[in-house]
């Protein structure tokens, strides 16, 4: 399916590993003389009910039949929420496509597969709009890690920044110069912070205030930093199970109070990001003192985390407007959907180590 024009209106939908909710972003994406521009016209995050959180959190434990049923049900749920959004904004006639990331259940590119649930056919049927989904599988089929895929947006829409950092459930980073772009997962982020905040009956640690009250457990911090994953060369990616298997058991033993565990987690995240920024800067011959790091994702609102990151790196941290902070990933999905309609590359082999750049996404027509 090819659709070539200069201006597109697309809706990007994102369900992240931190289970904050369903991000829906109505975006205007334009191209003129090989230069891409964007506008997030309107966006919102629809919190998941406790039932949906529970279903998505435990999806890995389902049988094949149960998982496929959840895949179908979640697709219908996404379709209904997007349809409500479109109706409220009265924009049905102007939307070229919906691009839905779905919710990652399994991600094992080394075994040749990745699984994001949220049936695109159900979304298309429910909304009456062409839907692009399954945005990673083609890259994995070409031998890539299938993640991160947001760097195509970093390249086309955020070219003013040498580095782009996403502080989501997992922290990931992209780095680019005139000739190449590299990207990789760094470490768990909000998956860790939210886990311990919720033990104090809070959805998240607002501004990092709880972590700021705690003390670092140096011995547990060093165990986190010495995980073999951090010694691997990039490109590299993390499955959601990394937190459960490798990080949370160590943090459970950090200090006596929940605040100590949060403080140790914050320092781990900040130090690992700072280390990886320095490493990838050397790879692309970038001078950190003359570079900017654009930070987006929910963790950007954690002021204490940002303070600790700045304390550990000399690069200038750039904090954009709230819409970009919250919905950059949904914007990236919209761009990936538009590129899929145009039949153009939307996942880069330089960041996934695939054999070739690829055009990712299954297209479902209503």
Image: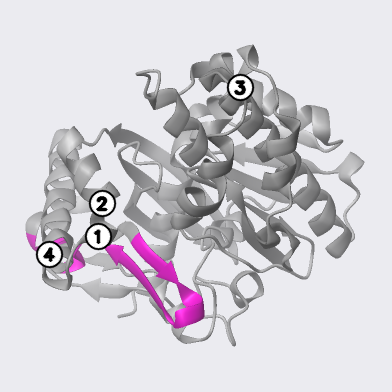
Q: Which residues are magenta?
A: 105-125
Give me the residue at 14% from left, 59% from top. 70
Give me the residue at 66% from left, 48% from top. 164
Looking at the rendered image, the disc whose residue lies closer to the viewer, 3 or 2, is: 3
Q: CA distance from mark 3 to mark 2?
A: 27 Å
Provide the secondary structure element on which disc 2 rests: loop
| Front-lying residue, 332 or 314 | 314
Q: Which mark is residue 66?
A: 4
Q: Which mark is residue 61?
A: 1
Residue 223 appears at what percent x and percent y? 70, 46
Residue 218 appears at what percent x and percent y? 75, 32
Name the residue carrying label 3.
Answer: 260
Q: CA distance from mark 4 to mark 3?
A: 39 Å
Q: Describe residue 88's horizontal placement relative to residue 166 as left or right.
A: left
Q: CA distance from mark 4 to mark 1?
A: 9 Å
Provide the secondary structure element on which disc 3 rests: helix
- Up/down of 293 relative to 321, above or below: below
* Scheme by which the image is coloured: one colour
Tell which circle, 3 or 1, labels the residue nearer the N-terminal end.
1
Provide the secondary structure element on which disc 1 rests: helix
Name the residue carrying label 2.
Answer: 58
Q: CA distance from mark 4 to mark 2?
A: 11 Å
Q: Describe residue 290's horizontal placement relative to residue 116 as left or right.
A: right
């Amino acid at each position: 399916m090819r659709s070539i024009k200069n201006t597109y209106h697309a809706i990007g939908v994102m369900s992240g590993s931190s289970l904050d909710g369903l991000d829906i972003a109505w975006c205007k994406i334009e191209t003129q003389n090989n230069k891409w521009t964007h506008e997030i016209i309107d966006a919102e995050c629809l919190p998941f009910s406790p039932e949906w959180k529970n279903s998505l959190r435990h999806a890995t434990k389902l049988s094949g039949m149960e998982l496929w049923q959840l895949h179908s049900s979640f697709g219908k749920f996404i379709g209904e929420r997007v349809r409500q959004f479109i109706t409220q904004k009265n924009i049905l006639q102007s939307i070229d496509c919906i691009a839905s990331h779905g919710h990652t259940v399994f991600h094992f590119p080394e075994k040749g597969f990745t699984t994001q649930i949220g049936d695109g056919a159900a979304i298309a049927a429910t909304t009456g709009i062409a839907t692009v989904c399954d945005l990673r599988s083609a890259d994995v089929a070409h031998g890539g890690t299938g993640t991160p895929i947001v760097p195509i947006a970093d390249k086309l829409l955020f070219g003013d920044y040498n580095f782009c950092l996403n502080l989501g459930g997992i922290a990931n980073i992209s780095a680019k110069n005139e000739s190449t772009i590299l990207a990789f997962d760094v470490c768990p982020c909000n998956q860790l912070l939210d886990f311990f905040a919720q033990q104090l009956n809070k959805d998240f640690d607002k501004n990092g205030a709880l972590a700021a009250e705690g003390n670092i457990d140096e011995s547990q911090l060093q165990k986190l930093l010495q995980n073999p994953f951090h010694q691997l060369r990039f490109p590299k990616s993390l499955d959601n199970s990394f937190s459960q298997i490798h990080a949370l058991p160590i943090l459970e033993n950090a200090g006596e109070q929940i605040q100590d565990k949060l403080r140790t987690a914050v320092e781990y995240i900040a130090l690992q990001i700072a280390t990886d920024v320095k490493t990838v800067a050397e790879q692309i011959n970038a001078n950190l003192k003359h570079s900017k790091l654009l930070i987006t994702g929910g963790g950007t609102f954690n002021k204490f985390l940002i303070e600790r990151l700045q304390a550990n790196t000399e690069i200038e941290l750039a904090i954009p407007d709230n819409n970009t902070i919250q919905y950059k990933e949904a914007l990236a999905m919209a761009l990936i959907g538009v590129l899929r309609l145009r039949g153009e590359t939307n996942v880069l082999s330089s960041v996934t180590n695939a054999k070739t750049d690829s055009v990712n996404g299954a297209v479902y027509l209503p």
